[in-house]
Image: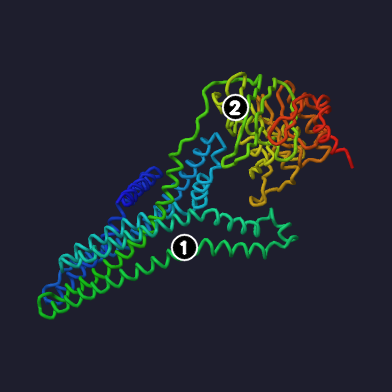
Amino acid sequence: MKKFKSYFLLLFEGLRTFAKASKWGTFILVILVPIEALVPTGIIFSIQKVTTELTKGSAFSMSWGIFWAVLLLISNIIPPATTAISGYLTDVLIANINQKLIEKSSEIKNLEVFEDAEFYNDVETVRSELSWRPVNLIVFTLSNVRYIISLLSLLILLFNYTWWLPLAIIIVLVPQSLIHYRIQQEAFETLVTRRPEARKMNYLLEIALNRDYAKEARLFNVFNFLKKRYWTLFYSVHKEENRVRLRQFGIALAFIIVSSLVSAFSFIYLIFQVRSGTLSVGIIVGFASSLVAAISASNGLVEESDLLYDTLMWLEKYLKLMKRSFDKSGNIKISEINQIKLENIMFFYPNEKRASLCGISLEIKKGEKIAIVGQNGSGKSTLLKLLADLFVPTKGKILINNVDLREIKQELYWEKVAPVFQDFSKFKFSIGDSISFGKMGEVEKALDFSGLAEFTSEIQLGKEFAGTDLSGGQWQKLAIARAFYKENVELYLFDEANSALDVQSEKQLYRKLMELASGKTVIWITHRMTSVKLADKVLYLKNGRVLGFDSHENLLKNNDYASLYQEQFDD
């Protein structure tokens, strides 16, 4: 009963979502759909009246013929009108939902939430089905309202012929619907549970069709592997779904047989009534038409409500995401970053047993240039993400000007930070928008600083948008240009920002960086040890721990560091 109640609560939320998208569109549909649903009953009733008058030989009243013609006209006019309005409502609804999702995403301040598998699955369910679920929400809601009104009016009409037939239809319909809802919920839960496998299937298809994988997919001949892996996943995913479909078919068939037997018995009963002269021929015409329409409406209601229930399960995921609250940032305002202090920082990624960072304590003063070095997996990138306030330390504190970073207003802190991440984003906008995101400023100057002076801000990026594609090094330079473009920066965070650059471009990067960041704090991660000579201090990490934090010259006295440095210059 609770689940049935939640069904109607979700349906109510769906109607509220429509109204928020377009009040006038929803209002018009609320008027048109009931009229459309009542028309079939009116047509059947008018035909019954005309038939009765003709068979009795009484004077024929044109009013019933005119009434039938008017209803026929209405039945032809309303469907295209509701289709047009529901199409408009769908477009606005999708736009509103997309806007809400963008707004909600902006509330996520701590990226640790994306490491939560359940949250990620919910987000993927909402995102991957966003293009068609809102359409289904409108279509199936309207269909169900139409079927319910139509069925009720037909049952009332049938009640005039025999009282027990409408009752029999309801007795068959209710358990059939409840069982179908339960099966549909199981099907949706199965779909959500299988979401990781479905994502893997989509990823395999992406490898086969996406241009980013085209070269290696062919040279390494991965297509046979893709096909075998796809079929393995397909059978795993669809085995349970097919079981649910067979159950649905079996139950539907059983109820169809029962309802058909009841209908046949009722029809035979009325035939005898007509033959005995108790009822007129017009009555049996009306009864037969009403019965066929009622059974059709009841079957349609069960099928469409199944599909609506499935869509409402998606709506529940969407509403759950919209209602979810995320960690709020602090309220302390800062205008500059004079000091960064780490106190015994420890950090675990969710579901990880090994600490990525362990016991990190150090102090960085304003204007210092810090290079971070270490083997892969030593915690360098993780440390930068913590300094960017994208993750919160599991233990310990990051102090900015002796204030806990968690107490500082995050938006104001981010305004002072310019990052270039190792896995930088490739925004497929124009070059200007990929750097400035609509803000006014000197984009060309940032392009020149990053070594992309030959490009203009108007150039569209991305082959899929009929634009230009960039090389790996050019994409990285564009990410650097974003950092250089940002104003009022106090802290530059570069995570291997030179990894895709040639030697000449790397030299230019550091020269421009030191010029632009004079008096600013710069922290960069590098595997190319030549750049450490530009640093005031070098932070040497190994297995998430600090093995050294000093000038390059002093660290050379550390055998581990000296060995790491010398490896790059040995043949």
According to the picture, the residue beneath numbered tag 2 turns out to be 396
Q: Is residue 227 above or below residue 200?
A: below
Expressed as whole percent of the image width and height from the top left, the position of residue 496 reads 73, 37
Q: Residue at x 55, y 21 (%)?
A: 333
Expressed as whole percent of the image width and height from the top left, the position of residue 541 reads 72, 33
Q: Residues within 10 Å of mark 2 (few under 14, many from 20)?
A: some
Residue 288 position by quadrant: bottom left
| SS label for mark 1 | helix
Horizontal side of 362 relative to 100 (left or right) equals: right
Furthest-bottom residue in view? Answer: 275
Q: Nearer the viewer, residue 19 or 216?
A: 216
Structural distance between the alpha carbons of marks 1 and 2:
48 Å
Q: Residue at x 33, y 64 (%)?
A: 300
Q: Is residue 376 above or below residue 270?
A: above
User: Mark 2: which amino acid?
Assistant: Gly
Residue 564 position by quadrant: top right
Q: Is residue 298 above or below residue 263?
A: above
How many tags in the picture? 2
Residue 158 visible, this orientation: yes
Q: Nearer the viewer, residue 86 or 117?
A: 117
Residue 363 position by quadrant: top right
Q: Residue at x 74, y 42 (%)?
A: 474
Q: Nearer the viewer, residue 196 or 163?
A: 196
